[in-house]
Amino acid sequence: METSPQLRLIIAVVISSLIAFRSYKRKSLDLSGGIAGFLVMTIHFAAGFRYGALLLVFFLTSSKLTKVGEDKKRRVDVEFKEGGQRNWLQVLCNSGIASVIVVIACTLTGWQDKCLDPKQSITVTALIGGIIGHYACCSGDTWSSELGVLSDAQPRLITTFKPVKKGTNGGVTKAGLLAALAAGTTVGLTFIIFGFFTAKCPSDVALKQLLVVPLSALAGLCGSLIDSVLGATIQFSGFCSVRNKIVGKPGPTVKKISGVDILDNNGVNFVSILLTSFLTSIAFMYIF
């Protein structure tokens, strides 16, 4: 399904406007988040429907999962917001890198959707791999966090495997890790399914595209693990005896659990996404 860049831009603006407005009304995004979401979504859909689909799958599933078990999450998360409302900074931390890669990739391809084929362009293959890794990581981390905290199992700190309270940065559960794997798989399947309609590949190349699914699944899991390691080491976690909750800043009533106060949650997300995108792009260069 080939469309001109101009038509894609019009469709992108319409889709992005509707989704951003709906997300703002449903409190998935605040006003700044809605504006930032509109911009990054427009970039993705204008570049190609397949890229827009990756962003949309991440955003819609994450928004839905954020609202699952809200009462339980409210008791654990000191920064809990009704509906999981996200602002501009969170939107850019979770989609800014991909937006840049998407623009670079599409500039190199003349704004045409291409298959993963190093024989045509190893650079484009690596860039597309980075985009897939980006959203596999974002989805994996979010699914892991949102579903893992609902598990009855006690989390264990990834660096020491000692039991920790729910909500501790770097705490992992089997349910959370399986959720990350499922999230990565979903991202990979989305890329493949939309690719059937947007990219024309020779039969031998088309068959090899299926490798995206297991690679994306691993990227989702690895991204979640990288995020957990960073959270356990360079992000502070402590228990506040006044609030009776896990907090992310030191204080006189806070007993340290793990980590040092270098990055906040947005910073950890950004670094883990950057690392996962880079590693995935390298993997795609060699495997494809």
Image (cartoon, rainbow, N blue to C red):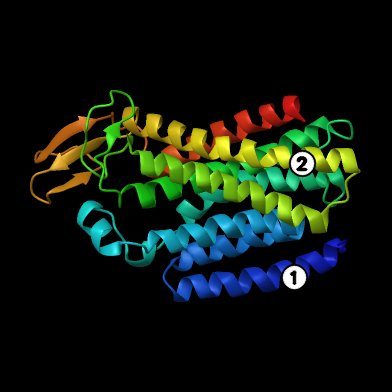
The tally of labels here is 2
The reply to whether residue 267 is visible in this rendering is no
Mark 1 Cα-neighbour bin, 10 Å: few <14, some 14–19, many ≥20: some
- On-image quarter of the C terminus: top right
| Residue 109 falls left or right of residue 223 | right
**Point 73% across, 33% down: residue:** 126
The reply to whether the C-beta atoms of the residues labelled 2 and 1 are less than 8 Å apart is no
- Above or below residue 78? Residue 125 is above
| Residue 120 falls left or right of residue 216 | right
* Residue toward you, 69 or 80: 69
For disc 1, the marked residue is: 11
Q: Amino acid at mark 1?
A: Ile
The reply to whether residue 59 is visible in this rendering is yes
Quadrant in the picture for residue 54: bottom right
* Residue toward you, 201 or 228: 201
For disc 2, the marked residue is: 209
**Point 81% across, 59% down: residue:** 197
